[in-house]
Image: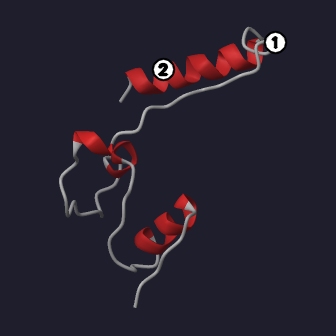
Amino acid sequence: MAFQTAHQAIAEQAVLFGGVGIGFYPLHEARKRTDLIEVVAHRDDWQVPLWLVTHVDMHRTAKVQGFLNVLKEQRENQ
């Protein structure tokens, strides 16, 4: 039997809470858990760049700049 979904949250629930089997899980989140077992070691080519695209008129707004600051802080704390 196989389970497949395009939704990350559903895949996480299936693996973490349903005990379905193995699956991909964000490394920074996995480090917070003691009940997970790493099956395949992390590979650098699995990383995906993050792009934040905004409308030219919105880029300098306080909301967008605040969100960028949160992202940068999270990145630095990893």
Residue name at image x 49 percent, y 31 percent: 50
Q: Tag 1's secondary structure?
A: loop
Pointer 2: what residue? Answer: 73
Name the quarter where the N terminus is drawn.
bottom left
Seen as rendered, the residue at the extreme top is 60
The amino acid pointed to by label 2 is: Glu
Up/down of 2 relative to 73, above or below = below
| Residue density around tag 1, few if under 14, some if 14–19, many if 20 or more, within 10 Å | few
Pointer 1: what residue? Answer: 57
Relative side of 14 to 53, left or right: left
Name the quarter where the C terminus is drawn.
top left
Seen as rendered, the residue at the extreme right is 57
Residue name at image x 39 percent, y 49 percent: 26
Up/down of 5 relative to 2, above or below = above
Please state the horizontal and vertical placement of residue 67, each as a whole percent of the image.
65, 23
Please state the horizontal and vertical placement of residue 27, each as a whole percent of the image.
33, 46
The amino acid pointed to by label 1 is: Asp
